[in-house]
Amino acid sequence: MIDHMATLTVPPTPVSPRDDAIQLYKAFKGLGCDTEAVIGILAHRDATQRAYIRQEYETMYHEDLLKRLASELSGKLETAVLLWMHDLVERDATILKEALYTGFINLGAVTEVICSRTSSQLQVLKQVYHSNFGTYLEHGIEQQALGDHQKILLAFLSKPRDESMEVDMEMAANDAKALYKAGEKKLGTDEKVFVQIFSERNRAHLVAINTCYHDMYGGSLKKAIKKETSGLFEHALLTILQCAENPEKYFAKVLYKSMKGLGTNDTTLIRVIVTRTEIDMQHIKAEYHKKYKKSLKDAVHSDTSGHYRSFLLSLLGPNL
């Protein structure tokens, strides 16, 4: 069953994974690949269906569908489709592994993925990462991230946060006070306090701290973070705070920035569209339209081309 917040459109009558596997095999045969046919199938199947197709394909043709896709497709389309073929957690694990260990280390992507996921998602992610790659996610972070940025990522990964909506307002006010004292009130910043509060409190509590901060000191916690911290540490704190308040608005902004100005940051564009399609893309599209007065689909359409464009647009589903 697909979440109403997702944008994936699947056929009203389910197609058998075996038929899909046969159609894919046909699309690969002969000279060149019938890329549109491949997109027509894979961009309209949910995670469970994609896993079954992969199993069927392997059973029938004795080869891994992912390896075949990698040899048939190329460039940005290949990146997007291969990422799409995984389920949610495996995909996050793959993104993190690539961002930590390929030639181009992408700590921004690592920060976005870790700091926008819930505590329970992160626990599962750590297990999958370890079983898939035989190494601990924490080791990669220790190797590549530095200073306070490293500390917040490791703390956020290791501290279990409850995911209820319950908030102790007195505690939230004390936290707001502690953050004020550690930041705007003093010369320099006591980053330890920021790391502790942002890694230990749940989302509802962080939203309450934000309100208390504003009520008590007249400024926003977001502005205080921007003033008191910088670089990837600032990025981590803002991601945690903004995803506590409104993750869809956060991702709409990430998408906007990836397409703003000359050139497109395709790595970001692919990552966000592929990871959010089956979660909250419907809401991200609405937030995008509200904030930028333009539909996300139109923005993606004008920033991409060819089969790559048609694949991303298929994932985004119908316009608002």
Image (cartoon, helix red, strand yellow):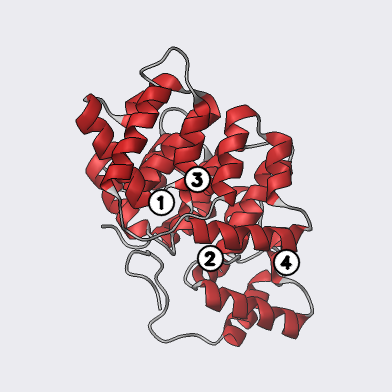
Q: CA distance from mark 2 to mark 3?
A: 31 Å
Dot placed on the residue nearer the N-terminal end, 1 or 4: 4
Type of amino acid under label 4 = Arg
**Secondary structure at numbered mark 4:** helix
Label 3 sits on a secondary structure element that is helix
Q: Amino acid at mark 1?
A: Asn
**Mark positioned earlier in the residue sequence (3 or 1):** 3
Of tags 2 and 3, the one toward the viewer is 3
Q: Amino acid at mark 2?
A: Ile
Quarter of the image holding residue 218?
top left
Mark 1: secondary structure:
loop
Residue at 65% across / 43% down in the picture?
99
- Mark toward the start of the polypeptide (4 vs 2): 2
Location of residue 223 with respect to 186 vertically, above or below: below
**Gap between marks 1 and 2, in whole Å?**
39 Å
Crowding around mark 1 (Cα neighbors within 10 Å: few <14, some 14 to 19, many 20+) is: many
Work out which quarter of the rendered image holds the C terminus and state it: bottom left
Q: Which residue is mark 3?
A: 115
- Which residue has dot 4 on it? 68
Of the two numbered discs 1 and 4 in the rendering, the one whose residue sits closer to the viewer: 1
Rendering coords of residue 142 (x, y %):
71, 38
Compare marks 4 and 3 and give the one earlier in the sequence: 4
